[in-house]
């Protein structure tokens, strides 16, 4: 079977995903993004081994580079590679004893949104259910994953009204996104990074990671391929536009596979929109577990405090400074949680 295309980085409002955006909405926009994670430990950490998903992957319409990565204390080893899903990752080994750890990544990102797909022209959802298991590149996103065990009759029942017989898969997923936005309240105190998806479904409260998990779990419960996307939102909206929910930290949304022609389509249930010129893509995964911004194993440390800061600001066309390291530009062609006993996982 042919490998399905990556998403065309659509831009749209909730009214109709088939209506082209204005030329202004499709104009390139350039951002500087800074993500800082800091730990303060009560007992000295002897060594740390970390995996960072903090560099942006190449996706259509997004041109990005890492301007700088500053780690304190300085690591003994940094090794960059691609993970099994094609995301850029960095392995970081620190052998200097420390009470504080900070990781700051600065990105230069230019987005050029393209025309949105016609969701009403996508295949009937039953057709996707029947054919997706045979498409190797999407079949794994039908299966259970660490944060989204299957099957889930509750999630299937939640999504069922959005997918009557014969409905185009894109239109049904768009309605599911809108329903999550309408039924769930954004509440950063209601859940933690380990809250099970069925508890979020019951609470009807949570944050962007929770809403993405609900949407992905509901789609998979019907037999539709869906995957998790980590990224960022612009921190300050354009004049006269409302501030987006989730702009103070890492953001997350969902992708649904809409067949070979439309490919993967990104939908943000937190803000009830297809992704647009406000969204920066970092990584794809089965769920949050695959793309946690910073995770790993430490020796020592005991209790700790966590500070995370994300800032995304629009830049002019002036060449940006490069403090320490500049990676080549790439462009596509096609919270906190401790699992203590030495392991530390961060939602940043």
Image: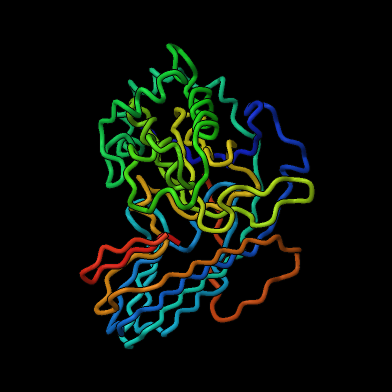
Quarter of the figure with the C terminus: bottom left
Q: How is the image coloured?
A: rainbow
Pinpoint residue 277: horizontal percent, then vertical percent.
Answer: 65, 47
Pinpoint residue 260: horizontal percent, then vertical percent.
Answer: 45, 29
User: Of residues 154 and 51, which is closer to you in this image?
Assistant: 154
Q: Can residue 261 be seen at all in this image of the molecule? A: no
Q: Residue at x 41, y 85 (%)?
A: 73
Pinpoint residue 337: horizontal percent, then vertical percent.
Answer: 34, 61
The image quadrant of residue 214 is: top left
Task: Check the image and name the residue furthest to the bottom.
Answer: 96
Q: Can residue 96 be seen at all in this image of the molecule? A: yes
Query: Compared to 240, does 123 lie above or below?
Result: above
Pinpoint residue 16: horizontal percent, then vertical percent.
Answer: 65, 26
Q: Residue at x 54, y 74 (%)?
A: 68
User: Of residues 113 and 96, which is closer to you in this image?
Assistant: 96
Q: Residue at x 69, y 56 (%)?
A: 236
Quarter of the figure with the N terminus: top left
């Amino acid at each position: 079977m042919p490998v399905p295309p990556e998403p065309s980085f659509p831009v749209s409002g909730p009214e109709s995903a088939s209506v082209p955006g204005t030329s202004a909405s499709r104009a390139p926009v350039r951002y500087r993004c800074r993500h800082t994670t800091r730990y303060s430990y009560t007992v000295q950490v002897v060594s740390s081994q970390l995996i960072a998903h903090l560099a942006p992957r190449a996706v259509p319409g997004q041109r990005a580079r890492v301007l700088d990565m500053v780690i304190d204390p300085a690591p003994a080893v940094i090794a960059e590679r691609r993970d099994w899903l094609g995301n850029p990752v960095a392995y970081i080994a620190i052998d200097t004893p420390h009470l504080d750890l900070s990781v700051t990544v600065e990105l230069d990102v230019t987005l050029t949104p393209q025309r949105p797909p016609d969701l009403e022209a996508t295949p009937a959802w039953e057709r996707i259910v029947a054919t997706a298991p045979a498409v190797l590149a999407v079949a794994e996103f039908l299966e259970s994953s660490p944060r989204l065990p299957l099957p889930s009759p509750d999630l299937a029942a939640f999504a069922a009204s959005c997918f009557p017989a014969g409905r185009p898969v894109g239109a049904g997923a768009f309605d599911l996104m809108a329903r999550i936005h309408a039924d769930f309240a954004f509440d950063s105190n209601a859940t933690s990074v380990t809250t099970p998806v069925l508890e979020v479904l019951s609470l009807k409260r949570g944050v962007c990671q929770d809403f993405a998990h609900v949407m992905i779990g509901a789609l998979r419960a019907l037999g539709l391929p869906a995957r998790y996307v980590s990224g960022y939102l612009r921190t300050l909206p354009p004049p006269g536009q409302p501030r987006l929910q989730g702009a103070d930290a890492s953001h997350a949304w969902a992708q649904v596979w809409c067949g070979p022609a439309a490919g993967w389509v990104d939908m943000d249930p937190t803000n009830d929109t297809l992704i647009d010129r406000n969204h920066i893509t970092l990584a794809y995964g089965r769920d949050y577990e695959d793309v946690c911004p910073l995770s790993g194993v430490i020796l020592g440390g005991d209790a700790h405090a966590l500070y995370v800061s994300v800032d995304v600001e629009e830049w002019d066309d002036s060449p940006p400074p490069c403090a320490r390291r500049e990676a080549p530009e790439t462009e596509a062609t096609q919270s906190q949680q401790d699992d203590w006993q030495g392991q530390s996982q961060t939602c940043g």
